[in-house]
Amino acid sequence: MIGSNSSQLLFYFGVKKVYKMSATITDKKSLAPENHLHATETRWFAVRTGFRKEKIVHKRLSRKGVTSYLPLYSVIRRYERKVKHLELPLINSYIFVKISKAEYVRVLETEQVHGFVHFNKNLIAIPENEIDTIRRVLGEDTEIAVVEEGYKKGDLVEVIGGRLTGLHGELIEGEGQKRLIIRLKNIGVGLEVEIDAKYLRKQKK
């Protein structure tokens, strides 16, 4: 959502989904207060890129020596005469950078970077554990619907088995099956994943 407009978008990737929450973008011509930027400590921030320019921006930032992370997921596209194996961005037009204050302008000056993502007009650093959560979710191969009795929509659960052990989320209904949403508050997205009920433990609200 560019400028002051706010909305909620839904991105599909395989059987998983990414729910994108409201955010605003810093225009290159009017730098907003730096907020969580630190003079020496590097921190993660979300950056908005041009449409389908995520990989290009990732390469350009790497050439500048800027640490960046572009979450990708694998998908198979079947055409009449061929099958393509693709790696697509998890969040459209999003990339993450780990920078200090000195690198802020360098990122903004990168071609096809549209600006930093703000929440409530604040430039918020993304905790390392939320970046780690994305890495873990993308590395989780198991996609099993939760069908075991005893769980219902809205239950808060903790993952107690597999690569996602320790993560918390909320069960939701989806296409007749129960799935788990892991909310990343500082990134502004929720990741929907399927996981075996035996790896879940109900939490008190």
Image (cartoon, helix red, strand yellow):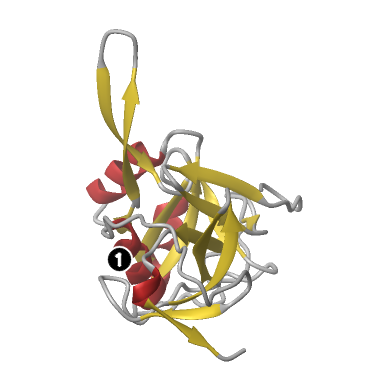
- The image quadrant that residue 52 belongs to is top left
**Other residues around mark 1 within 10 Å, as few (<14) / some (14–19) / many (≥20):** some
Q: Residue furthest right?
A: 5
Left or right, 177 with reference to 120: left
Rendered location of residue 56, percent (x, y): 34, 37
Looking at the picture, tell me which residue is in the foreground, 125 or 178: 178
- The image quadrant that residue 154 belongs to is bottom right
The image quadrant where one finds the C terminus is bottom right
Q: In this view, does 124 lie above or below 110?
A: below
Query: In this figure, which residue is indicated by the disc labeled 1?
Result: 136
Q: Which residue lies furthest to the bottom in this view?
A: 204
Rendered location of residue 194, percent (x, y): 42, 59
At x 39% / y 55%, what residue is drawn? 106
- The image quadrant that residue 135 belongs to is bottom left
At x 62% / y 50%, what residue is drawn? 27
- Could you tell me the amino acid type at mark 1? Arg
Q: Which residue lies furthest to the front in this view?
A: 149
Left or right, 201 with reference to 152: left
- Is there any visible trace of residue 66 in the rendered image? no
